[in-house]
Image (spheres, grey):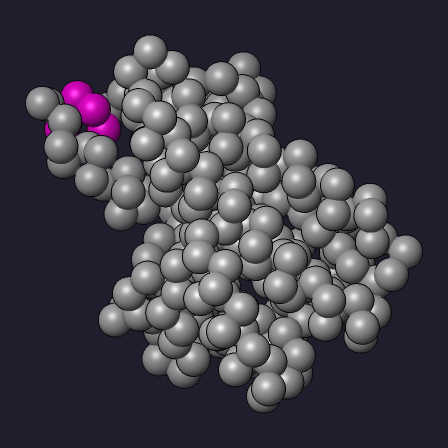
Amino acid sequence: MSAVATDLLETVSDFRGRRVLVTGAGSGIGLAISRKLLARGAEVIAVDLRIDDIPNGAVGLSLDVSNEAQIAESLERVKELGPIDTLFNNAGIGSTKNVLECEVDEWDRVFNVNVRGTYLMCKHLLPSMLENRYGVIVNTASAAGLIGLPDRAAYCASKGAVIALTKQIAVQWASEGIRCNTICPGTVDSPWVGRLIDEAEDPVARRQQLVGRQPMGRLGAPGEVAEAAIYLASDAAAFITGTDLVIDGGITAG
């Protein structure tokens, strides 16, 4: 391995002294991000509705990311212990309806978590980042925010909104030490996808369908996506802002 590659790897691997908040940290990609950050020396605040499954060593925070009053109260206590310099907005929910099938309540629920939650967490953590002239935000969008997928009306629209919001934040505060990027996973072998498969009339056929639409012929692993997210948050990505890092097994290449 070259000296340059070694230096890059060390930069991505070192999060000592960083205070990081991860939403949706109780399962899937968020849990994988939290575990990997802890292994890299970060102080991790793991946020989820239920914090039973957050990794050992993280500070658990039970929070509904769509509830601004909860966010304001909870983050005020967290920030008393020191500023948070890195935010992973990973909390999200899905929907498997097209426009004709999706009821207004379901549409609003998806947008409240996926878009409103991302906006609120940024709104309440950006001021201290700006004060310190350093902050990194990584928002979890989706390949579904870049292309249309059948029966994903609310989900595609919400993830497209996250991508647009990310770019706006990046442009707004790039000169003040803030970086903001998205990761865009394809179909990942997460608990939510697992439930979709289990609830199908033919779970085996459903899994084969999800695997088959990805040119690499397999589902992604939460740990693979987590590594991409952590790279964007690391100082190795210091010149990257406003971009979408796609980890989708080739779905969007077709």
Hey, which quadrant is residue 93 in on the image? top left
User: Residue lying furthest bottom in this view?
Assistant: 81
Q: Is residue 185 above or below residue 88?
A: above
Question: Is 189 situated left or right of 126 in this image?
Answer: left
Question: Residue at the location (64% across, 57% down)?
Answer: 123
Q: Nearer the viewer, residue 61 or 140?
A: 61
Q: Quadrant of the N terminus?
A: bottom right
- Please state the total of marks drawn on the protein image: 0
44 or 128: nearer the eye?
128
Q: Residue at x 54, y 20 (%)?
A: 147
Residue 13, percent from left and from top: 62, 70
Q: Quick check: can you spot residue 231?
A: no
Q: Residue furthest top?
A: 100
* Front one among 65 and 249: 65
- Magenta region: 203-207
Does the segment drawn in magenta span residue 115?
A: no
Q: Residue at x 73, y 67 (%)?
A: 127
- Residue that lies at the very extreme toward the left in this rendered image: 201
Residue 27: x and y in percent read: 33, 57
At 63% from the left and 74% from the top, the residue drawn is 84
Question: Which residue in the rendered view is the most extreme toward the right?
Answer: 175
Quarter of the image for residue 196 reads top left
Whether 176 is drawn above or below 93: the answer is below
Q: Is residue 247 above or below residue 77?
A: above
Indicate the quadrant containing the C terminus: top left, top right, bottom left or bottom right: top right
Residue 122 coordinates in the image, percent (x, y): 63, 57
Q: Position of residue 44 (x, y in %)?
A: 50, 75
Q: Main secondary structure of the magenta part?
A: helix
Quick check: can you spot residue 92?
Answer: yes
The answer to whether 189 appears left or right of 241 in the picture is left
Left or right of residue 117: residue 189: left
